[in-house]
Image: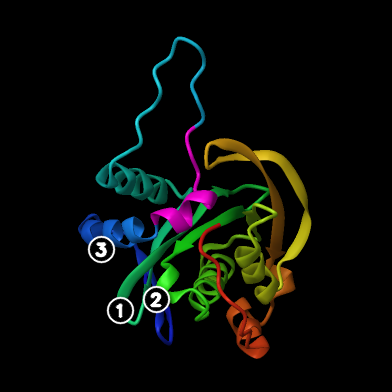
Amino acid sequence: MILTDGEVTLRPIRVRDQRAWREVNRRNRDWLRPWEATIPPPPPGLAPPHRPTYRQMVRHLRGEAHAGRMLPFVVEYRGRLVGQLTVAGITWGSMCSGHVGYWVDRDVAGRGVIPTAVALAVDHCFRSVGLHRIEICIRPENTPSRRVVEKLGFREEGIRPRYLHIDGAWRDHAVFALTAEEVPEGLLNRYRRRKPRTPGAPHK
C-alpha cells in the first residue's frame, strides 16, 4: 500500500531501492550513528553475527510483513527516498500493538517529514490494520526525536532501562504511546491542526 500526504509518501521498501537507500544512508552515517541499533557481542565461544546485506534486510522485512508482524516502508519527500519507517513487533490477540522506528536524511530534517510519516503510519495501523496501541521508544538524550512525539501528542509512559543495544552499548529508552481511542479524528488531522514548526528528528 502507498500512504501519502502532500509531499510526503510512505511505500513498501523494495530491492530496487538499494542504490538510493545506500546513498542516503552513507551520507548520513555520522549523523545517524548515535541512534542506530547495533548487534551486541555474542556469548563466549560464539562467532559474532554478520550485519545483513541490503538484500537480506529487505527479504527479512518482507517475510515479516507477509507474516503480519511488520510494516516496512521507505519515506519519500517530493518523490525522493529520504529515509525509512518500520512498524515492527506487531502483536495480535488481546494486545493488538506495534512499535514505530524511523530514520531520515538530515537534509530534510525540520520540514515535518517524519512527523507526517509517523502520523500516516499510525492512522493506517489504527484504521486499516486493526491495531489498538502504537509505541515509540527513544533514547532520552535524543532531543530532536522527542520533539516528533511531542508534536504528535504521544503520551510519555516512563523509562525502560538498558532497553536496546544502540551505538555499541545497552541504552535506556523513554517510552511514548498512543491508543486508537486517543485520536478518534486521526493523528494526521490532529497534527495538521497543531502545525508544529520545530526541527525534525534524525533517527529513533
* Residue 119: quarter of image: bottom right
Q: Do the residues labelled 1 and 2 touch (CB within 8 Å)?
A: yes
Residue 190: x and y, percent?
Answer: 66, 83
State the SS at label 1: loop
Q: Residues within 10 Å of mark 3 (few under 14, many from 20)?
A: some
Q: Circle 1 sits on which residue?
A: 79
Q: Which of 50 and 116 is in front in this view?
A: 50
* Residue 7: quarter of image: bottom left
The CA distance from mark 2 to mark 3 is 15 Å
* Residue displayed at 62% across by 53% down: 96
* Residue displayed at 52% across by 78% down: 110
Q: Nearer the viewer, residue 8 or 169?
A: 169
Earlier-in-chain disc, 2 versus 3: 2
The kind of residue tagged 1 is Gly
Earlier-in-chain disc, 1 versus 3: 3
Q: Do the residues labelled 2 and 3 touch (CB within 8 Å)?
A: no
The kind of residue tagged 2 is Thr
- In this picture, residue 25 sits left or right of residue 138: left
The CA distance from mark 1 to mark 2 is 8 Å
Q: Circle 2 sits on which residue?
A: 9
- In this picture, residue 182 sits left or right of residue 99: right
Q: Circle 3 sits on which residue?
A: 20
Q: Residues within 10 Å of mark 1 (few under 14, many from 20)?
A: few
Which stretch appears magenta?
29-39
Residue 165: x and y, percent?
Answer: 56, 38
Residue 154: x and y, percent?
Answer: 71, 67
Q: Residues within 10 Å of mark 2 (few under 14, many from 20)?
A: many
Question: Was residue 119 drawn as part of the magenta stretch in this picture?
Answer: no
